[in-house]
Image (cartoon, coloured by chain):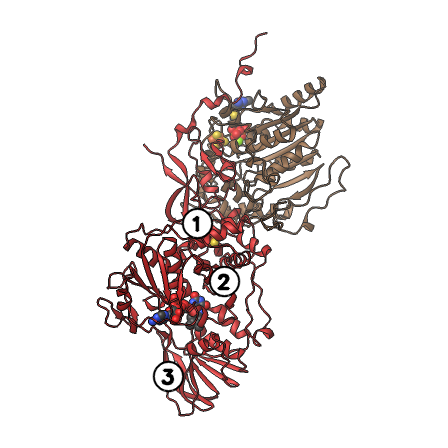
C-alpha cells in the first residue's frame, strides 16, 4: 500500500536542521567570583567549601577550607566575618552564616582528628618566623606546604599570640586553639617558646634563608591620665594576658574601662567574670561610632556591662574616677563640655590601643618604621632583602584574619624570593566545564527567584547567668542539622551547582546534561542563542558572549 | 531520603522545588525535565523563534504526558506556530505520534481519534490535542465545547501566547486589553486592543463541568508537570491552558520569556488554578507579589502605556484585572478564601492542597 508522505517522515528528522547557524551570541559556562571570597582577608573562598558542605561532604569542605586557612575552629569563633557583610544572600533575606559553618567544620575536624595536608617536597631552604601569633603560624604552615624548613621563635610561654593572651577563653576555648596549633606543628614546624628574638639582623646572620617578622602589637598604649598616687590603673592587654596565664587579679567591685574597641569590651567582660558587680565602659563617642563589633557590644550589654557614651576620663584617684561629658562637633569629633562627674571605681583599666615592640629591628639597614609599624612592600618584604613582616606589626587592619592572610601571602612571597613558584599547591577541583572569569558576582547577576526561603540559623548562646560566673564559652556551635541548613542557604554565587535549570529551560533542547559532577555542555549545532539558560541560571554561572566571527 | 555522610536526614534544599532539578534532591523528587531520559517529544532543529515560550511549553507538556502514559499516546495539533515550526517540509521535530489537520478542528479530530481507538479496543493509547489560543478560543471553540460536552477522552492543551502569532501577530480572543497587535495598532484615542472583550477559556471549560481544568505557565515547571500528570490520571474531557510568552509578538527579549511568564503569574494577571468537575480545587499562590506594571513594562506590545506619555488609567485598569483575579481565586489569601466547593465527586481523586513545596 502507498503511504502518504507525512507518515514517511523519520522521527525527529528536524535534527538535520542545524539551527545553531542563527546564533549571534552563545552561552558559555563560567566560574565567576563570589563576593564572600573577595572579602575574606585570609583568602578563603567560602563558596567553594560551602559547596561541599551543602552536600554533607564535610571532610571535603574542611580540606578545601584549610588549603587557605589552617584555623577554621578559631576563625569560626573570632573572625569578624567580612565575608558575611559581602554575602549576596543579605539582599534576599540575611547573609549566610558562613562563620558558623566554618566553626562547625573546624570543631568536627578536631573531633575527628583530621590532619592538615602534608608538607611539600623538601627544598632545603630554612626560614625563621619570629612570633607564633596567627600571622607567624599561618606563614609557617604555608611555608611547610611549599617544602621549606620552618622554625618559629616566640618570646611567650606558649604559642598563639593574641589568640591566647588577648582573646579571652569565653570566646576562644584553649583546647580549640591548642588543637589547631598542634596540627600545624604536626606538619613539621618547630616552635621555640620563651625565646625572644632581640635582633633581627643577628637572626639573619644565623644563616636563615629568610626571616618573617610577625611580632604583633603586644604593648598596651599608655594614655596620659592625670592620676593621684593611690589610683589603681591597669592596661587591658596586661590584664587579659595575666588572666590568660591563670592569674585572678583583684579588681574590686567597681571597674571602669576606658576605650571603645574590642579590647575594651573584652576587658569589661573579663572584669565582670572576675567578680566586678559594676563594669562600666567609658567611651568618648556614640555607639554607632564605636570600633568594637556590634555583636560583642550586644553580648556585653546582655551581661550587665554598662557604657557611658560621650565621656572621657579626666582624673583618676583611689576609689574615684572623674569623667567629663563630651559632645560631637559637626565633623563627628568629640569635644569637651566642661561638665564633670565623679564615679566610684576601684580600678581603672585603659584599653586605648596596642603598640608594637620593634626593638628587634632598630638599626637594621633598610628597615623603616613609620607610625610605630614596620613598612613593607607589596610582597610584605621590608627594605632589608630577605626580611619580611606581617600582621599587627605592619600597617594594616588588626585582626586574626588579616594576620592569617598575611602569613599566607608572606609564605608565597618568601617562596618566590627563594626561587620557588610562589603559589601554594591546591587540590581543590577546579569547576569542570567552566571558563574562569574575573567578574565578581553582584546580586543583579543572580536569579534569586529560584532560591527557597530560609531564614538564617542562629547560634545558641549560653544563658547570661552562667556567663558572668565563669569563663565558659558564650556562643555555641551549630548542630549537624543547622549547619547543613545554613550551608545550603548559600546561593553558590557564580558557580554551577547543578540545578538543571539550563537543561530544562532551553526551548531547543540544546543543553547536554553530562550527569552528576560533570555539569553541562551547550550543543552549538542547535543552540539559537536565545539566552534563556543564562537568564534563568540562579547562580549567574552562564555568560552570553558574542558569536565569534 | 537523602542523608549526609554523618547519616542525618536532609530537610532543606537550596532551591527547593523551584528549579528544574537539584543535585541535592533525590532523583525521584526532581522534575521530569531534569531527567537524562526525558522524551524530548519536541526535539532540536525546529524553527521556532529564539526563546519561543510555545516550543518550551510544548516539550514540557508532552514529555510529562509521555511519562504519564509510558509513551502510549497520540497528539493532534491545530494549525499555528507549533505546527508550522515543528514540521517544516520535509522534516519533523516530533518524537511522538502526531497528527495535523486544520486550524479550527483539532478538538474534533482528537475526538475522532479517541473514538477510533475505542472502536479498535485500544484503551491503552491516550489522546492529547494541542493548539494555540487562536485555534482554541476562537476558531476551534465550537468543536472544543462539543468535545467537553460529550466528555470525549481527550486532554486538550491550549498554548496561550495571546494572539495569532503564526500569521503575523493578529489579535485573538485571548489577546489582553490594551496590547498592540498587527490588528490593534497603537492609533486613535484608545490604542491597542479594546477592553471588555476576549475570553477566559479556563472558566468557560470549568462551566462545562469537565473532569479536569487547569492553568499553568512555563515559569513553574513542577506545577505544569504535576498538572499534566494529574490530567492524565483522569478519563474523559480535560483542559489545560498554558501561558507561553512569545518574544516576537510581545516585543520581549528572547531571554526574557520565562521571566515574563513569571511576572504574569506573580502579578495576578494570569491566575494559576486547578478545577475538578466544575469546582476550583486549588490555586497556586503568589509567592512574591509584583504590581502589574512590572509585567507590562518590558513588553513592546504595552510600550504605548509608558511612552511618550504614561497612561495611568490604562495601567490601573490592567491592575484591576489582576486584583480581581487575586480576589476571585484567593491568590494571596489563606486557603479559607477559596470559593466554596461541593464535596468531591466520587470519580475524582481527592483534590491536593495548594502545591506543597519541597522545603
Ligand atoms: C583583647 C583582644 C581581642 C581581640 N579580639 C579579636 C577578635 O575577636 N577577632 C580578631 O580577628 N582579632 C582580634 N584581636 C586582634 C588580633 O588578636 C590581632 O590582630 C592578631 O592576633 C595579630 O596577629 P599577629 O600574628 O600579627 O600578632 P600577635 O597575635 O600579637 O602575635 C605576636 C607574637 O609574637 C611574639 N613576639 C613579639 N615580639 C617578639 C620577639 N621579639 N621575639 C619573639 N617573639 C615575639 C609574641 O609573643 C606573640 O606571640 C584582638 C586583640 C586583642 C588584644
Ligand atoms: C481556517 C483558517 N483560517 C486562517 C488560517 C491561517 N492561520 C494559520 S495559523 C493562524 C493563527 C494561529 O494562531 P494561534 O492559534 O493563536 O497559534 P499561534 O501561532 O499563536 O501559536 C491563522 C490565522 C488557517 N490556517 N485556517
Ligand atoms: S551566597 Fe554563598 S557564594 Fe554568595 S556571597 Fe553568600 S556565602 Fe558567598
Ligand atoms: S512567533 Fe512567537 S510563538 Fe511563534 S515561533 Fe516565534 S516566538 Fe514562538
Ligand atoms: Mg497564539
Image height of A543 relative to A184, above or below = above
Q: Closest to the observer: A161 or B188? A: A161
Pick whichever of labels 3 and 2 is earlier in the sequence.
2
Give the Cα distance between marks 1 and 2: 42 Å
Q: Nearer the viewer, mark 1 or mark 2?
A: 2
Residue named by callout 2: A179
Residue named by callout 1: A444
Q: Colour of chain B?
A: brown
Quadrant housing the N terminus of chain B: top right
Marks 3/1 same chain: yes
Left or right of A270, for residue A143: left
Q: Are marks 3 and 2 in contact (CB under 8 Å)?
A: no
Left or right of A201, for residue B19: right
Left or right of B107, for residue A59: left
Pick whichever of labels 1 and 2 is earlier in the sequence.
2
Residue named by callout 3: A336
Image height of A332 relative to A317, above or below = above
Q: Colour of chain A?
A: red
The chain carrying label 3 is A
The chain carrying label 1 is A
Q: Closest to the observer: A158 or A38? A: A158
Instruction: Tell me: is circle 1 under 8 Å from ligand 3.
Output: no
Q: Residue B223: give x, y in percent of width and height.
A: 60, 40
Image height of B199 relative to A122, above or below = above
Amino acid at each position: 500500500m502507498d503511504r502518504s508522505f507525512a507518515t514517511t517522515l523519520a522521527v525527529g528528522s528536524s535534527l538535520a536542521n542545524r539551527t545553531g547557524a542563527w546564533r549571534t551570541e552563545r552561552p558559555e559556562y563560567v566560574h565567576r567570583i563570589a563576593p564572600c571570597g573577595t572579602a575574606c582577608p585570609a583568602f578563603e573562598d567560602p563558596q567553594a567549601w560551602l559547596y561541599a558542605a551543602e552536600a554533607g561532604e564535610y571532610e571535603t569542605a574542611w580540606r578545601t577550607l584549610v588549603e587557605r586557612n589552617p584555623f577554621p575552629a578559631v576563625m569560626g569563633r573570632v573572625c569578624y566575618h567580612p565575608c558575611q557583610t559581602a554575602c549576596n544572600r543579605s539582599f534576599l533575606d540575611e547573609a549566610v552564616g558562613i562563620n558558623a559553618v566554618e566553626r562547625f567544620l573546624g570543631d568536627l575536624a578536631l573531633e575527628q582528628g583530621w590532619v592538615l595536608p602534608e608538607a611539600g617536597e623538601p627544598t632545603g631552604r630554612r626560614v625563621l618566623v619570629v612570633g607564633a601569633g596567627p600571622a607567624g603560624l599561618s606563614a609557617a604552615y604555608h611555608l611547610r606546604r611549599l617544602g621549606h624548613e620552618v622554625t618559629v621563635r616566640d618570646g611567650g610561654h606558649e604559642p598563639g599570640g593574641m589568640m591566647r593572651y588577648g582573646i579571652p577563653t569565653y570566646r576562644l576555648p584553649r583546647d580549640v586553639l591548642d588543637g589547631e596549633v598542634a596540627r600545624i606543628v604536626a606538619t613539621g614546624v618547630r616552635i621555640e617558646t620563651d625565646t625572644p628574638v632581640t635582633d633581627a639582623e643577628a637572626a639573619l646572620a644565623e644563616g636563615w634563608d629568610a626571616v618573617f617578622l610577625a611580632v604583633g602589637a603586644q604593648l598596651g598604649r599608655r594614655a596620659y591620665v592625670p592620676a593621684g598616687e593611690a589610683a589603681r590603673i591597669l592596661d587591658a592587654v596586661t590584664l587579659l594576658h595575666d588572666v590568660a596565664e591563670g592569674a585572678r587579679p583583684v579588681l574590686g567591685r567597681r571597674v571602669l574601662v576606658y576605650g571603645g574597641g574590642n579590647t575594651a569590651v573584652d576587658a569589661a567582660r573579663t572584669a565582670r567574670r572576675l567578680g566586678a558587680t559594676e563594669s562600666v565602659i567609658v567611651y568618648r563617642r556614640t555607639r554607632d561610632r564605636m570600633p568594637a563589633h556590634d555583636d560583642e557590644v550586644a553580648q556585653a550589654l546582655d551581661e550587665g556591662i554598662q557604657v557611658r557614651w560621650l565621656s572621657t576620663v579626666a582624673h583618676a584617684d583611689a576609689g574615684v574616677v572623674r569623667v567629663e561629658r563630651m559632645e560631637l562637633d559637626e565633623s563627628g569629633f568629640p569635644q569637651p563640655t566642661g561638665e564633670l562627674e565623679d564615679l566610684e571605681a576601684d580600678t581603672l583599666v585603659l584599653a586605648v590601643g596596642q603598640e608594637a615592640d620593634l626593638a628587634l629591628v632598630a638599626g637594621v639597614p633598610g628597615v623603616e618604621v613609620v607610625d610605630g609599624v614596620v613598612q613593607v612592600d607589596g610582597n610584605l618584604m621590608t627594605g632589608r632583602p630577605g626580611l619580611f613582616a606581617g600582621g599587627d606589626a605592619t600597617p594594616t587592619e588588626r585582626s586574626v584574619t588579616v594576620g592569617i592572610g598575611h602569613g599566607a601571602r608572606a609564605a608565597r612571597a618568601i617562596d618566590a624570593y627563594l626561587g620557588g613558584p610562589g603559589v601554594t599547591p591546591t587540590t581543590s577541583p577546579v569547576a569542570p566545564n567552566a571558563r574562569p572569569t574575573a567578574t565578581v558576582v553582584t546580586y543583579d547577576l543572580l536569579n534569586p527567584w529560584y532560591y527557597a526561603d530560609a531564614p538564617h540559623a542562629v547560634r545558641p548562646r549560653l544563658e547570661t547567668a552562667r556567663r558572668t560566673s565563669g569563663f565558659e564559652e558564650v556562643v555555641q556551635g551549630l548542630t549537624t542539622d543547622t549547619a547543613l541548613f545554613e550551608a545550603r542557604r548559600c546561593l553558590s554565587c557564580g558557580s554551577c551547582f547543578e540545578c538543571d535549570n539550563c537543561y530544562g529551560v532551553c526551548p531547543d533542547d540544546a543543553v547536554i546534561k553530562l550527569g552528576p559532577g560533570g555539569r553541562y555542555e551547550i550543543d552549538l549545532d542547535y543552540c539559537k542563542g536565545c539566552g534563556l539558560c543564562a537568564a534563568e541560571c540562579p547562580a549567574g554561572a552562564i555568560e552570553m558572549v558574542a558569536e565569534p566571527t | 531520603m537523602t542523608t549526609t555522610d554523618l547519616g542525618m536526614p536532609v530537610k532543606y534544599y537550596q532551591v527547593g522545588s523551584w528549579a528544574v532539578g537539584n543535585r541535592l534532591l533525590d532523583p525521584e523528587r526532581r522534575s521530569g525535565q531534569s531527567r537524562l531520559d526525558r522524551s524530548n517529544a519536541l526535539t532540536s532543529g525546529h524553527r521556532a523563534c529564539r526563546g519561543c515560550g510555545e516550543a518550551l511549553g510544548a516539550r514540557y507538556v508532552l514529555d510529562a504526558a509521555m511519562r504519564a502514559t509510558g509513551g502510549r499516546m497520540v497528539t493532534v495539533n491545530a494549525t499555528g506556530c507549533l505546527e508550522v515550526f515543528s514540521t517544516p517540509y520535509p522534516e519533523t521535530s516530533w518524537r511522538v505520534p502526531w497528527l495535523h489537520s486544520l486550524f479550527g478542528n483539532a478538538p474534533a479530530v482528537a475526538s475522532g481519534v479517541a473514538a477510533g481507538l475505542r472502536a479498535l479496543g485500544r484503551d491503552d493509547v491516550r489522546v492529547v490535542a494541542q493548539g494555540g489560543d487562536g485555534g482554541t478560543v476562537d476558531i476551534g471553540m465550537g468543536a472544543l465545547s462539543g468535545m467537553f460536552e460529550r466528555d470525549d477522552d481527550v486532554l486538550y492543551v491550549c498554548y496561550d501566547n495571546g494572539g495569532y502569532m503564526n500569521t503575523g501577530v493578529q489579535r485573538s480572543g485571548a489577546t489582553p486589553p490594551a496590547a498592540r497587535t498587527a490588528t490593534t495598532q497603537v492609533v486613535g484615542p484608545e490604542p491597542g486592543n479594546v477592553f471588555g472583550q476576549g475570553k477566559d477559556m479556563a472558566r468557560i471549560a470549568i462551566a462545562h463541568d469537565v473532569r479536569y481544568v487547569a492553568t499553568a505557565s512555563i515559569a513553574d515547571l513542577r506545577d505544569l508537570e504535576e498538572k499534566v500528570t494529574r490530567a492524565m490520571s483522569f478519563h474523559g474531557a480535560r483542559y489545560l491552558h498554558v501561558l507561553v510568552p512569545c518574544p516576537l509578538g510581545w516585543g520581549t527579549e528572547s531571554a526574557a520569556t520565562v521571566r515574563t511568564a513569571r511576572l504574569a503569574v506573580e502579578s495576578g494577571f494570569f491566575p494559576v488554578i486547578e478545577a475538578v468537575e466544575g469546582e476550583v480545587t486549588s490555586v497556586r499562590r503568589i509567592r512574591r507579589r509584583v504590581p502589574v506594571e512590572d509585567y507590562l513594562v518590558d513588553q513592546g506590545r504595552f510600550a504605548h502605556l509608558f511612552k511618550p506619555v504614561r497612561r495611568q488609567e490604562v495601567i490601573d485598569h490592567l491592575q484591576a484585572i489582576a486584583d480581581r483575579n487575586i480576589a476571585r481565586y484567593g491568590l494571596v489569601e489563606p486557603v479559607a478564601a477559596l470559593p466554596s466547593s461541593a464535596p468531591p465527586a466520587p470519580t475524582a481523586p481527592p483534590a491536593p492542597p495548594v502545591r506543597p513545596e519541597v522545603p
